[in-house]
Amino acid sequence: MNTVRVSTSKEYNIHIGKGILSDIGEMLKNEFGVCTVAVITDDIVDSLYSNTVISSLEKSGFRTLKYVFPHGEESKTINTYASILSFLAENEVTRSDILLSLGGGVVGDTGGFAAATYSRGIKSVQVPTTLLAAVDSSVGGKTAVNLPSGKNLAGAFYQPDMVICDYSVIDTLPEEFFADGCAEVIKYGIIGDYVFFEFLRNNDIKENLKYVITRCVEMKRDIVNIDEKDNGIRAILNFGHTIGHAIEKCSNYTVSHGRAIAIGMVIASKSAYKKGYCDTNISEEIKEVLIKNSLPISCDFTAEELFGVALSDKKRNGDIIKLIIPEKTGKCVCKNIHASELLSFIKAGLG
Ligand code: GLY
């Protein structure tokens, strides 16, 4: 098992190992002692992994509770969040107990936000079951639910108390979900580690999950340790996301997050070169690794369509848009551009 230590406002460990779901009871008991654990999950993950987790917890002496909601982004709402809080209250969960989020990004974000706010904050344990959640959303403390007017508009920075990543679960993900996570993995190589990017060029992600997840989590840890509240360097984790989010929205969310980010990274890197923001055109290298991992490299939306929805992105700060520009593979910088320049930026990347 690999362990990565995070030192933010809260210090915690991320454990990455094969088959460790069945050790969860002992891992939590060693760290926190015996208490009540409320397992929050979705219907699909529940049918696959709840029994393993709950029987491990009960064998170690924990009292367990389980709250299951329907899978999918549609569940990431204030209603689900409020129902979880009521469930915790009805079952007399206290501040010395644990909320364990078992699932992908939707479960982790919603469960994490409930943990952040129930009784002004209880212990939060993240158990990611997708590659995307393992390398991104389970680490770093961003928790949120969506509002009708936008994604992640109600939330909190709330670091987990432990992350337990059993990569044998991730190994068995359907290909389409696995590829989504690969886009975020490739992003880490581009933003922070040329050697890792070369590794991804020459090796298979699935065959190297322990190393790949550990390396991504270490990179995220290093960024979040410096900028926990997302006031500076943390923005580089959003490489490809401004255009990626626009693609997701334009497609009415039929293009998944990972696929949209993949295309967003190609457009942003190509445009950054054509616009003279960097000296190297790395879009061809990026395309090669994306294709190798069954990810798309282009879309049919026009620059005008993408520009229209990108302008409504909540990450906008007035008329200034923060773009993440790859100077070369392994190094990205933030560049503020005026909103009016975004259309020609997207055009250059599509052309
Ligand atoms: N997913 C981007 C971040 O955690 O900042």
Image: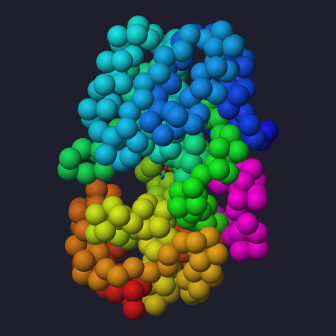
Farthest residue in the left direction? 149
Q: Nearer the viewer, residue 315 or 248?
A: 248
Q: What is the basis of the colouring in this image?
A: rainbow
Q: Is residue 168 above or below residue 81?
A: below
Residue 195 located within the stretch drawn in magenta: yes
Farthest residue in the front direction? 47
Quadrant assignment for the C terminus: bottom left
Residues drawn in magenta: 192-219
Residue 328 is at least partly visible in this image = no
In which quadrant of the rendered view does residue 301 lie?
Answer: bottom left
Q: Nearer the viewer, residue 241 or 65?
A: 65
Farthest residue in the right direction? 1
Residue 224 on image: x %, y %: 56, 47
Residue 277 on image: x %, y %: 47, 83
Residue 213 on image: x %, y %: 68, 51
Q: Is residue 165 above or below residue 281?
A: above
Q: Nearer the viewer, residue 343 or 107?
A: 107
Residue 288 is at least partly visible in this image = yes
Quadrant assignment for the N terminus: top right
Q: Residue at x 70, y 45 (%)?
A: 168
Q: Residue at x 50, y 75 (%)?
A: 296
Q: Residue at x 62, y 70 (%)?
A: 293
Residue 212 on image: x %, y %: 71, 56
In which quadrant of the rendered view does residue 57 lie?
Answer: top right
Q: Is residue 81 left or right of residue 130?
A: left
Q: Nearer the viewer, residue 23 or 283?
A: 23
Residue 151 located within the stretch drawn in magenta: no
